[in-house]
Image (cartoon, rainbow, N blue to C red):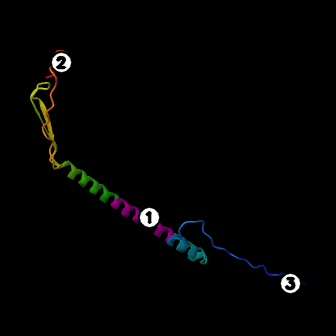
Amino acid sequence: MTAEPKLIEYKFEFQWGGEDTWFTKASRWAQKQKYPINHLTMGFIVWLWEKWVDGKVELEMASVDKQAENIKNQWENDDEQPEPEIVETGVFGDEDWSIRISNPVVEGRTKKSDTSMGTGSNEVRLE
């Protein structure tokens, strides 16, 4: 009777890219345990993972809400700035007609222009 050679069994652990998270580490550890323990620990680890994901989602949503509030406040501050003042004097086409636009947000105001329209016979007068 000849003794058969024993076959050595090797097990390799590998992960397909990405980050080795606490979940993957804990899952590998749980799978190495004996039958009743591995089943219970795997269920507990999956439950913890779901709670962890829910917490991360809540944190991200709170961050988005804060960013939306900041944008809303910025828009409200932009709306509070004074509107430019538009003053029209005279009738369009008259020699003394002019328009002045001033914006209090900008330091300098526009100066009164000396623009006038010609008074030729083919020009139409606008009112």
Relative height, residue 23 to residue 60 (above, below): below
In the current view of this chain or complex, which residue is farthest to the right?
1
The span shown in magenta is 44-63
What residue is shown with label 1? 53
Marks 2, 3: nearer the viewer? 2
Cα–Cα span, label 2 and label 1: 73 Å
Residue occupying the point 60% across, 68% down: 15
Q: Quadrant of the C terminus?
A: top left
- Callout 2 secondary element: loop
Q: What amino acid is at disc 2?
A: Val
Residue occupying the point 66% across, 74% down: 12
- Callout 3 secondary element: loop
> Secondary structure of the magenta portion, mostly?
helix
What residue is shown with label 3? 3
Q: Earlier in the sequence, mark 2 or mark 3?
A: 3
What residue is shown with label 2? 124
Residue 90 percent across, percent down from the top left:
9, 28
Residue 65 is left or right of residue 89, and the answer is right
Marks 3, 1: nearer the viewer? 1
Residue 31's tag is: none
Marks 2, 1: nearer the viewer? 2
Residue occupying the point 16% across, 15% down: 121
Q: What amino acid is at disc 3?
A: Ala
Residue 38 is left or right of residue 10, and the answer is left
Please tell me in which quadrant of the rendered image residue 67 appears.
bottom left
Q: Quadrant of the N terminus?
A: bottom right
